[in-house]
Image: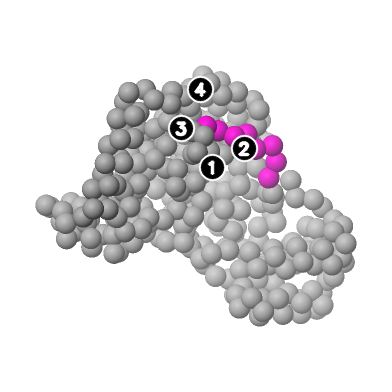
Amino acid sequence: MGDRRKNMLDVLERIAFALEGGEAASPVDWTQADLWVWQGALRGLKAVSSTHVLPLDALVGLEQQREILLRNTRQFAAGLPANNALLWGARGTGKSSLVKAVHAAVVKDPGAPLALIEIYREDLRDLPVLLDLLRAGAAQGRRFLLFCDDLTFETRDDDYKFLKSLLEGGVESAPENVLFYATSNRRHLVPRSMTENEQRTAIHPGEAVEESVSLSDRFGIWLGFHPCDQATYLEMVRGYADYFSLKTRGEALEREALQWAAARGARSGRVAWQFIQDLRGREGGDGVEVT
């Protein structure tokens, strides 16, 4: 009960702080960059000059997810209706890589001033302050993809309520120039233990369960990412080898890639990427550089 009361007081303090006008949003020069990170400790945005982003064509085995997310993002960048998206599934299957690659592709389109802003899970309580900045960005013609990687909520965690308000129906709901993308290992962001806890302590148990479980339902697009089979894994390896113009090819490439996966005890896009990084190093690092 003590932890629950502490969380409630923390929420009330942040709401009061925002209502009193604390940490007023400072103007941002959005022409500095297309990539930004929200720094919770400083209550401000940091421009990111460069990051490792693979081209969409290099993300093998994600063709269906790629087409859906790319279409949705282009609609949003063009000022058309679009959906918030949840990319869920196994670790290392390319969820966050796809989000960054889609943004990199769309931002190159004519007339698509789309910025990607990453906010960490632990900083979701800063959403009211951040949304003020993004609303102001509309005056500069900017549109924003707000991105949270590895989004999950644990028992007695009230931060999901800030996100629910952003996604739909709250006073601090997202402005029209903001879309929210998230990745998660869970299809349902709120664990069953949390749902059961709220059901036991709520005056109206059914309403409490509905409030927490409905968070995932507020994403208009769900994209599933699953562990790959051996054929898909090798296709990924060959695709990376082609992209980086590596010397090792054919049976030698496949044999080494399978040995690498066996040592890791897993096959995934991340494992394929890590193998290619090792191979690039052994070949001297020649080839295409990731932007």
Q: Name the residue tied to disc 2.
A: 35
User: Which circle, 4 or 1, is nearer the viewer?
Assistant: 4
Q: Distance between the residues labelled 3 and 2?
A: 15 Å
Q: Residue 130 carries which label?
A: 3
Find out whether the residues at labels 4 and 1 contact each other: C-beta distance under 8 Å: no
**Above/below status of 279 relative to 34:** below
Could you say which is closer to the camera, residue 70 or residue 200? Answer: 200
Lateral position of residue 140 relative to residue 199, left or right: right
Where residue 252 appears, as percent x and y from the top left, is 82, 77
Among numbered discs 1 and 2, the one appearing first in the sequence: 2
Q: Which mark is residue 166?
A: none
Range of magenta residues:
44-51
Disc 1 is placed on an element classified as strand
Residue 74's image quarter? Answer: top right
Are the residues flagged by discs 1 and 2 in contact, CB closer than 8 Å? yes
Is 168 included in the stretch rendered in magenta?
A: no
First in sequence, mark 3 or 2: give its number.
Answer: 2
What is the C-alpha distance between the residues marked 4 and 2? Answer: 18 Å
- At label 2, the amino acid type is Leu
Q: Do the residues labelled 3 and 2 touch (CB within 8 Å)?
A: no
Cα distance, mark 3 to mark 1? 11 Å
Q: What element carries label 4?
A: loop
Numbered tag placed on residue 118 in the rendering = 1
Describe the element under mark 2 as helix, strand or loop: strand
Numbered disc total: 4
Residue receiving disc 4? 26
The one of 180 and 120 positioned closer to us in this rendering:
120
Mark 3 vs mark 2: give the one in front: 3
For residue 278, above or below residue 68: below
Residue 257 in sight from this viewpoint: yes
* Spatial CA span between label 3 and label 4: 10 Å
